[in-house]
Amino acid sequence: MDQLLAMRAFVRVVEAQSFSRAADQLALPRSTVSKLVTDLEKHLGIKLMHRTTRMVSTTSEGLEYYSHVARLIAEVDEVDNAARGKKVKPRGHLRVEAPTSFANCLLIPALPDFRRDYPDVTLALGISDRTVNIVGEGVDCSIRAGELHDMSMIARKFCELQYVTCASPLYLERRGIPNSPTDLRENHSQVGYFFAATGKAEPLVFDNGSNHTEVDQCEYTTNEGSGLIGMMLAGLGIGQHLRSFVQPYLDSGELVAVLDDWTRPPLPFQIVYPPNRLQSARLKAFVDWLLIRFTCAPGRFNDEH
């Protein structure tokens, strides 16, 4: 058994979720790819994949093995390319996922710069606030907000965005301006964000020196960033959103910032991808471009964009 080829075949099957697609990518017969994976399972003494006539899925042992092997294959390819002095011009198709507000407010307006620098790369941008299955859904990379808990993925933080608490003038005229989080909790309506996977609402968070408090009684919630902006614009209540996303509404007066003396910890954004994907010149180009375009010191990003 060619163990390196068998590991490469296994990685391709996991990512393609298909022996046939993996075989096409490797330019090998399907039967050869199937035998390589079977031989690898025998060599390891564990079952890596569940096979049926309709689908292929990875076992828990297989997923753990994949996380290590994918990194190893990427390192081997990187060493080979370096030894050859190979410089590949980025070209081909990229599938990128991004949260709704980040995509619409920041990423899409910047994409003409990426297109100018890499005209031979095409891009499909999936826009959603859900957490996609990068490997299972054939995604090259995903922009995610918050901390990453999947240790099988590589994550590179590229910015932190600051929050602002705000409401529409219509709401503030009707209900008044809160003077503290306690006032907000007792005398006002709140709108917020809930996580689609759990249905749990995210509280409004306030820090003022050593004081920390949370307000978790939102009357209206949504699982999508643009919807939260819409709720605030509609006068449904006071909410918190990332300043970079609501700045145009603050500038126009459609939203008004309140409780400026209270802050909320900034939200980190990361670019996430499987460990072996960076061997793709087009993905490396996109990651490097994203890091240069958006990386900044905490707090400076909002002033510059």
Image (cartoon, rainbow, N blue to C red):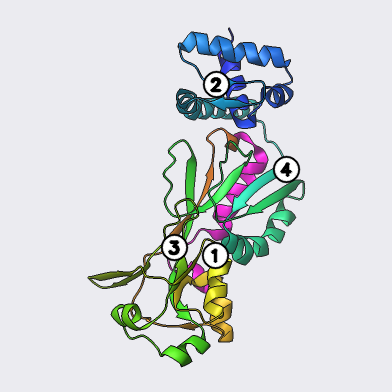
- Do the residues under discs 3 and 2 have CB atoms within 8 angstroms? no
Determine which residue is flagged by label 2: 49
Which residue appears farthest toward the bottom when viewing the image? 173
Q: Residues within 10 Å of mark 4 (few under 14, many from 20)?
A: some
Residue 267 x %, y %: 43, 61
Placement of the N terminus among the 4 image quadrants: top right
Local secondary structure at mark 3 = loop
The residue mark sitting in front, 3 or 2, is: 2
Residue 46 shown left or right of residue 1 in the figure: left
Q: Which residue is at a point 42% across and 62% down the rendered structure image?
A: 201
Disc 3 marks a residue whose amino acid type is Ala
Is tag 1's residue or tag 3's residue first in the polypeptide sequence? 1
Local secondary structure at mark 2 = strand
Disc 4 marks a residue whose amino acid type is His
Residue stretch in magenta:
279-305
The residue mark sitting in front, 4 or 2, is: 2
Is tag 4's residue or tag 1's residue first in the polypeptide sequence? 4
Q: Residues within 10 Å of mark 3 (few under 14, many from 20)?
A: few
Disc 2 marks a residue whose amino acid type is Met
> Label 4 vs label 2: CA separation?
28 Å
Q: Is residue 284 magenta?
A: yes
